[in-house]
Amino acid sequence: MSPKGISIIGGGMVGASLALLLTKALPTIPIRLFESTRLLTGDSASSGETDASARIPAWDGRSTALSPTAVTLFRALGLWSELAEFATAIERIHVSDQGSWGLSQFTQQDNQQQPLGQVVENSGMQRVLHQALKRSSAIEVISAAQVTALRPCKGGVRLGWRSSQLIAPNSMAPVEEHKDSAALVVLADGADSPLRKSLGIAVREVPYEQTALVANVRFSLPHGGCAFERFCPAGPLAILPRGQSSQERVGALVWTFARTQQAAFEALSDEQLLAQLQTAFGYRLGRFEAIGQRQFYPLRLVVAKEQVRSHLVLQGNAAHFLHPVAGQGFNLALRDGLRLAEVLSEGAASGDALGELAQLQRYARAAEADQTRTIALSDGFNRVFSRREPGVRWGRDLGMLLLETVPQFRQVFIRQLSGQAQPVSYPRELNGPRELNSGV
């Protein structure tokens, strides 16, 4: 029997979003989603949040900043009403450079009086996406399963997989190996994808020698829906607004510093860490009062040198893993998914064989310009703002002055930051605007 359907390996936010998108764009194509952990399908009504004045919501929870393009996509998928429960609108963006006079601010006036984005709690987004997968009769979800091998075959790819529940130390139970095949396999299993490595797909990797500290923080003044990006000598520091209104006093912190400083940061008490944060950030949010569980992530740039092969395509962090400075990684992955869905939809309408190389090369060409610009933005921001030479700092200050005073510069910058710089179209089957680069 010839391979059929699409198999997506990786059920995180990228893989789950792509599965839901593809089932809309290709309603007659069977889709299987493999995920190594159990999916979150419990009630979304309980996220562990309480009044922000009493404690910090989701003390160990990360958040993602969604661009207007991403929000529009989730509206078209019919999921935004559920995601909105976990979302905070970005009404302003404040960019500053510690020790310099350079300053730029963006408001909703820069985006047709619409929010500049939305900050969504990751655990809430995962829960909503996984519940949507559970409701879909067109998607077969195989959770707690590990895909161990991929082999090209005529018309597709053969998969070998096993239940991760059977993979236990000292277990005497035999491990049952399963075999399957698909006309198209999507790798969305992360920046360190073992399957990508097993296929001999090389990557361009640039170590930043930096670590990101991620935590939720509470402060004494309302955030006012403002997202702050502050460039410090050790690296960028971002605080994203959290909570159900602009009057909340909780934010998501992403603090980047040299990797050699990680042990020192880990050893700090909460009071000592908040004091250092106060010195680096200032008093725009009043006094920092509390910090949640700290998580540390090494930072690097990883870009796969091959993103498509016959009947195989890489998505998300498996294709490109970016510095978090501009919050572009997940948003770029969603735009990649839209372009892939559009190409596959057009191919199905033309009678093309699913996953053939020429078809996937069309996708790669369509995604190339957006990927190149977005990777350059994230990488360039970090490199330029991490340097402290006087000439570089003067150039940064001048650049921020131009962003603040010249409308043309502001428009170009905000369109890139919001995911609207490169045209992105919806597949015809998806109920949404034909062009996505028009704001929310």
Image (tube, rainbow, N blue to C red):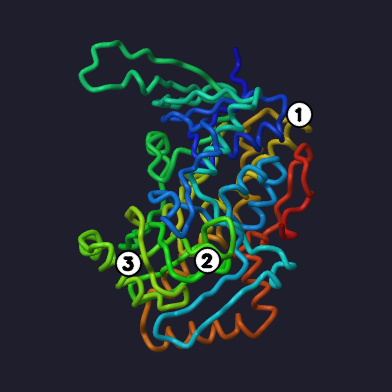
Asked if residue 13 shows in the view, the reply is yes
Near mark 1 (Cα within 10 A), the count class, few <14, some 14-19 or many ≥20, is: few
Looking at the rendered image, the disc whose residue lies closer to the viewer, 1 or 2, is: 2
Residue sitting at x 24%, y 16%: 171
Residue of label 2: 377
Near mark 3 (Cα within 10 A), the count class, few <14, some 14-19 or many ≥20, is: many
Tell me the quarter of the image containing the C terminus. bottom right
Number of the label disc, if any, that sits on residue 269: none
Residue in front for this viewpoint, 105 or 181: 105
Query: Helix, strand, or loop for circle 2?
Result: helix
Quadrant of res 65: bottom right
Q: Are marks 2 and 3 in contact (CB under 8 Å)?
A: no
Query: Helix, strand, or loop for circle 3?
Result: strand
Where is residue 397 drawn, in percent x and y? 50, 85
Quadrant of res 109: bottom right
Residue of label 1: 351
Looking at the rendered image, the disc whose residue lies closer to the viewer, 3 or 1, is: 3
Residue of label 3: 257
Quadrant of res 415: bottom right
- Type of amino acid at the residue the image marks with label 2: Leu
Above or below, comparing residue 90 to residue 47 in the picture: below
Q: Is residue 263 left or right of residue 86?
A: left
Residue sitting at x 53%, y 62%: 248
Residue in front for this viewpoint, 249 or 423: 249
